[in-house]
Image (tube, rainbow, N blue to C red):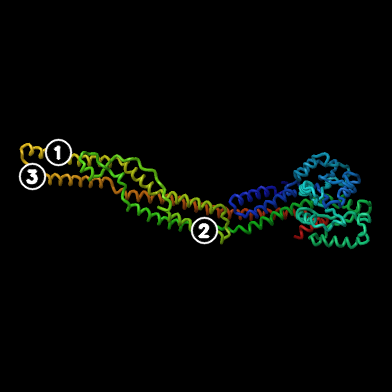
Amino acid sequence: MSGAGGALLPALDRFVQAAAARELLEASEIARLEAAVAAARAGGIDGPVEPLLVIMLCGPTAVGKSSLLNALAGADIAPVGVGATTDRPLLYLHEADDAARLFAYGRALGELAADRPAVVRHGRAAVRGKVIVDTPDIDSAVREHRAATEAAAAHADIILYVTSPEKYKVEDPLRWLAAHRQRHGIGFVLNKWDAAGMGMQFAQRGRVAEDFRALITRLGFVDPHVFFVSTQDEGAALAELRAWIEAALDRSTAMAVGALRRRAGWGGIAAALTAALATVTARTEDAREAAQLWSTAAAAARQDVHAAAAGLAARPAPSLYRPRGTGLPALAASLLAARLSLPPPAEPVAQPGGFGATAAAALRRAAGEIELFARTRGVRLGALPALWAQECDGLAEDLAAVPARAEAAAVAASAQARVRRGLATLWLGVVEAATVAVLALTLWRLASDFIRGTYAPFALLVSAAAMVALLAAFGQMGVRLLFPSLARRIAATGRGLAEARLDRAATALTEATVAQIEAAEQLRADGTALLGDIDREIARLSLNAPDADATAARLFAAARAE
């Protein structure tokens, strides 16, 4: 883009992309802003500054647009008459003007200029630097014709709205014109201003002229240029219009028109941007308050996790993981219930609604509170509620699996204690050896007495049983000392796992929320800075479009009035 506003359009594009990525603006607001930027671009806001006026003849069906172009050109360059229809724009361009320059005004106009049948060259110096374009009817029944006019009109500096006494009140073309008044200079031509064209209304032409002026005033056009002409009569009215195009639209006016168009385009963008920013109310305080809400919820969830983990210690340790001896005495094996070679732990199995369900519910409640808080503060959360729900669901699933994971981790840790396992093995070996010795000694005594034909005293059996029981008790005591309570270890491990997962969830939820609010705050700051830059660009353009240029001021009177 030429001029000082060259960096503003890319900055606006980045602003819109940032707003859309986090859904910080409503879709309707983004669409309005994008439409304003697109309209400004189509209107030449980033086109060349040097004057090259594009004047388009637009209007409803059968009002004599092509006849007017022929009259202005002084030659039959556009088909007229019964059955003649303009099906695409026709450009009247000076032979010294480079048609390729029109690409700078827009692709649609550039492609027309590159199409030889759509361009009529001339050598009239009075209209050099001015492109007069005949367009299809804006109320044509053929959709392609209307689309061609709309595409071409987007690049017009000045729209000469051509109508006739029998068509000037038709509503659809007037609505089309009203939609274009913000971005283009507008002039009016009431054609067929002769007895043949007006018929019985010719005697009342003064009343018709007054009614036409009143109509365009009601549309918001303040003191516009209005010409009453007849292409069938080379009279003063047509000469006045031709002189206005050739002389009044001089280089100074052309520059003023270009500046006014750009100013109108930036004004439309500024209006859309201001409306969008009015809905962005995020502040740094909002981010802090939201983070505090998450912190409070996480603290409550952590207490729930501690209570649930403490409950794991009350559960009996799985017998599968208790050490069990491998000695011969069955009595010692059953009493010690010990075995040092542990089987591989089972896979964790999640139990929905079990461990950690209360903690996950606490974070879900916090998500609802923060969503309400955001609505009251006018902060748009975008996709955050869905992300919150996903994170809370994942947390609930992971916490439900904590007991099984803690059990497996505690048992695996016990199995890895090699020194302790070695001491336990030695202890059980001593106990089992002593047990075997007692039993062997008892059996030998019983056998000896049987051979001698005597009976061992009953006290011997009682003493042997007491020794075996005492050894079993010592064995169990040693196992307990060397293998601390597995249930307590499972509880501690479960609490650590649950706390770590809860902290990750709380951190993720807090960071996502704070990032959204900070992004909204940054968007507002960027938008405010852009508005300041746009205001400075409008002020700069105002220097090139002074009110002293009466022709340009009257052409843009409707836009300036708003």
- Name the residue at 90% across, 44% down: 76
Alpha-carbon distance for marks 2 and 1? 76 Å
Considering only vertical position in the picture, is 79 above or below 164?
A: above
Nearer the N terminus, badge 3 or badge 1? Answer: 1
Residue 371 placement (x, y as % from top left)? 53, 58
Label 2 to label 3: alpha-carbon separation = 83 Å
Cα distance, mark 3 to mark 1? 17 Å
Answer with left or right where residue 511 lies relative to residue 266. Answer: left
The image position of residue 548, as x and y in percent, is: 81, 57
Residue at the limit of the structure toward the top, as seen here: 451
Residue type highlighted by circle 3: Pro
| Amino acid carrying mark 1 in the image | Ala
**For this rendering, which residue is in front, 225 or 348?**
348
Q: How many marks?
A: 3
Q: Image check: 110 left or right of 464?
A: right
Q: Secondary structure at mark 2?
A: helix
Mark 2 vs mark 3: which is more N-terminal? 2
Query: Disc number at residue 457?
Result: 3
Q: Position of residue 458 (x, y in %)?
A: 9, 46
Task: Please indicate, yes or no, whether residue 252 appears anywhere in the rendered image.
Answer: no
* Dot label at residue 193: none
First of labels 2, 1 by sequence position: 2
Residue 370, numbered label: 2
Q: Which residue is mark 1?
A: 440
Camera-side residue: 522 or 535? Answer: 522
